[in-house]
Image: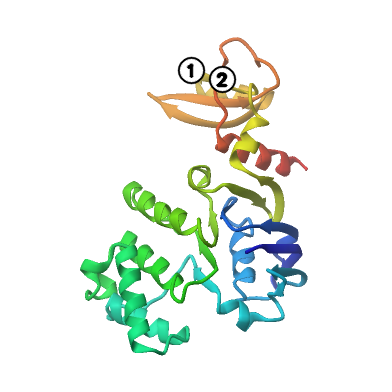
């Protein structure tokens, strides 16, 4: 399945321009869409999921005009938004069965077989009869992906799915998505760069509604080989001075001292050591360049 997004633009009534001529092609894979909060990721996801219309542009799903044939798209779509609402007093098995009916699965036997399989796949079988309000954050997210998988969708969209999950739940959730992504198209929208490097063969970076880069994580990293440098900074004054002199990508505290990462074609100055590039370096470098334009 291939999704072709062409020149998509959206401005909200309050004047916020959420998308600016975004064009993307997404194949049959797990595709990562990264960017800071407010970048336009959720607007793009909602538009592809047929929940809102753009001001201009088009979306093709295997030749089907998404904006003109929303009902047809919804038949093959599974969607997990940032905020996923459920009836809290219903059990997981009852809620999934109810949602399956809404998806058009009217055969009781087929519906039971589908729901049971999804509860097993998402590791919720043992708690299938418990009320959803008793679920942990990770369990609720796994239930969210279970409902998104109802009726065997060919396109799955998940918007910031690992927010609030502990590391173990995050890995379990992303491993599940990754296994699903071998057979269908999965679009993962996130601001967590590591999620994309670990699980997505292809990615795009969006900021202020604009597409800044598209490619594989490995391709983007190769462009920074030999150009990332690191140094331990002894004082806040030194840090501020370096930030005015060099292209500082990021800094973090280690043992009470700042460790900075800098982009430069050659060693910036005494004390800097070359380090392996990371996807976060690509992220911050492109955001910095975009902010300067």
Between 194 and 3, the one lying in front of the other is: 3
- At 55% from the left edge and 21% from the top edge, which residue is drawn? 275
Point out residue 212 in the picture as x, y percentages from the top left corner: 71, 47
Q: Quarter of the image containing the C terminus?
A: top right
Q: Which residue is mark 1?
A: 234
- At 30% from the left edge and 74% from the top edge, which residue is drawn? 116
- At 56% from the left edge and 37% from the top edge, which residue is drawn? 279
Point out residue 225 in the picture as x, y percentages from the top left corner: 63, 25
Q: Quarter of the image containing the N terminus?
A: bottom right
Point out residue 51 in the picture as x, y percentages from the top left corner: 60, 76
Residue 245, visible in the rendered structure: yes
Alpha-carbon span between mark 1 and mark 2: 7 Å
Q: As displayed, is residue 134 above or below residue 210?
A: below
- At 53% from the left edge and 57% from the top edge, which residue is drawn? 188
Q: As displayed, is residue 17 above or below residue 221?
A: below
Q: CB atoms at circles 1 and 2 under 8 Å apart?
A: yes
Q: Which residue is mark 2?
A: 238
Asked if residue 229 lies left or right of residue 253, the reply is right
């Amino acid at each position: 399945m291939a999704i072709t997004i062409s020149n998509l633009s959206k401005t909200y009534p309050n004047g916020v321009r959420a998308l600016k001529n975004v064009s993307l092609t997404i194949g049959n894979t797990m595709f990562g869409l990264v960017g800071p909060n407010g970048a336009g990721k959720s607007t793009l996801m909602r538009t592809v999921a047929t929940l809102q219309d753009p001001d201009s542009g088009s979306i093709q799903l295997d030749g089907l005009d998404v904006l003109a044939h929303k009902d047809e798209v919804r038949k093959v779509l599974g969607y997990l938004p940032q905020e996923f609402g459920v009836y809290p007093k219903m059990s997981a098995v009852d809620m999934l069965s109810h949602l399956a009916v809404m998806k058009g699965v009217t055969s009781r036997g087929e519906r039971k077989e589908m729901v049971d399989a999804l509860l097993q796949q998402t590791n919720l079988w043992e708690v299938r009869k418990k009320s959803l309000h008793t679920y942990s954050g990770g369990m609720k997210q796994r239930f969210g992906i279970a409902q998104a998988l109802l009726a065997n969708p060919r396109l799955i969209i998940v918007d910031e799915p690992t927010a609030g999950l502990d590391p173990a739940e995050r890995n379990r959730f992303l491993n599940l998505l990754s296994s699903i992504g071998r057979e269908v198209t999965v679009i993962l929208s996130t601001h967590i760069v590591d999620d994309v490097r670990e699980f997505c063969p292809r990615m795009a970076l969006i900021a202020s509604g604009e597409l800044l880069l598209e490619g594989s994580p490995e391709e983007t990293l190769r462009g920074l080989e030999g150009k990332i440098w690191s140094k331990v900074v002894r004082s806040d004054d030194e840090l501020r001075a370096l930030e005015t002199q060099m292209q500082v990508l990021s800094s973090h505290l280690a043992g009470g001292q700042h460790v900075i990462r800098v982009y430069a074609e050659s060693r910036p100055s005494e004390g800097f050591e070359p380090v392996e590039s990371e996807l976060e370096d690509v992220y911050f470098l492109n955001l910095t360049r975009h902010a300067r334009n």
